[in-house]
Structures are given as structure tokens and as C-alpha cells.
Amino acid sequence: MRALIQRVKEAKVIVDDVITGEIRQGLLVFLGLGRDDQLENGKKLIDKILKYRVFDDENGKMGWNLSQAQGGLLLVSQFTLMAQTQKGLRPDFGPAMPPQQAKVLYDQLVEYAQSQFDHVETGIFAADMQVHLINDGPVTFQLEIL
């Protein structure tokens, strides 16, 4: 399971000209699910994201987490994060979880995130999404739970 997290000034997801999720300051999280990923590992990743200190505190250091920064969380499923890219010129998506199974796990992780944090927005699983963001920094990290 991989998460690409970006600190943003604002972000939104649009599907078929409709905004499906939108935040102001916060974290945009692209979430990739692998074949063997489980709910318990996903909960650990969500917990880490929510506690990860990437926002400037009163001293200008990355000392505040999402809650302390009073930000929002925008979760977007992205199976391409699981691609193997070491060989050749075409990504291999074999390590990604099959779509039907991934949707169930993604929905469970969204539900868990919503139970742990007040302001959670999402894209639409497997939809053709346009993601708009203003990256703050830029500050981008890849988190992985094995």
C-alpha cells in the first residue's frame, strides 16, 4: 500500500464536470492498493497520514499534523502508484489489487478515515478524475506500509 501525500493550499476532484471532493489547506492523498494489502495495514497508513507532521508550526518548522493545522484530507484512489517501472518502457500494473477487491478496501479506508477525522473528502473510485491542486511548498512525501 502506497500513499503519495501532498501538502496543498487547496485541491479538488472533478468527475463529469461535477466537484466530488474539495478541500482548502490540507493533504491531497493519492492511495495505491497492492494485491496483498489488508484493512489493518490501511488503518496504520491512515493513522500515519493523519499524524504526519508536515505543516509549519509557530516556529516555521514542520511540527504540526493535519488536525493541528486545521486542514482537510482529500483521498483519491490511484492504482498506478503500484506499478512496477524498473523494466521496459511500459508500466506493469500486476502488483495492483484487482478493481473489485480494491474498491471494497478503498471504501473501508475512507470510512475509517472519516471515523478518525472530521474533514475527509474523496474522488470517485475508478472514475476518470481531474485533480486540481495548488501544492504548498511543494511538500510531497511517499508513505508505504508493507
Image (cartoon, helix red, strand yellow):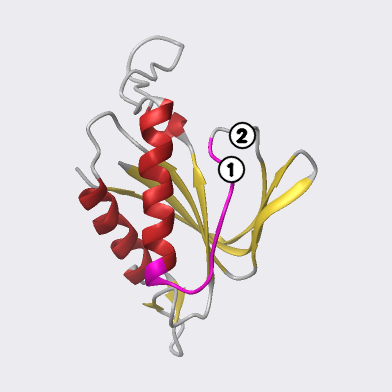
Whether residue 101 is visible, yes or no, is: yes
Return the x and y of residue 131 as percentages of the image width and height.
65, 45
Q: Which residue is mark 2?
A: 127
Local SS, label 1: loop
100 versus 48 height, above or below = above
Report the front residue among 7 and 3.
3
Magenta range is: 115-125
Image quadrant in which you'd find residue 104: top left
Mark identifier at residue 23? none
Residue found at the far top of this picture? 88
Return the x and y of residue 93 as percentages of the image width and height.
39, 20
Q: Residue at x 33, y 18 (%)?
A: 94
Mark identifier at residue 124? 1
* Three-letter amino acid code at the position of disc 1: Ile
Left or right of 16? Residue 50 is left
Return the x and y of residue 92 as percentages of the image width and height.
38, 16
Spatial CA span between label 1 and label 2? 6 Å
Whether residue 141 is visible, yes or no, is: no
Q: Residue at x 36, y 72 (%)?
A: 53
Report the front residue among 92 and 138.
92
Is 68 contained in the magenta span? no
Q: Residue at x 23, y 42 (%)?
A: 38
Residue found at the far bottom of this picture? 58
Quadrant position of the C terminus in the picture: top left
Q: Are marks 1 and 2 in contact (CB under 8 Å)?
A: yes
Q: Residue at x 41, y 58 (%)?
A: 111
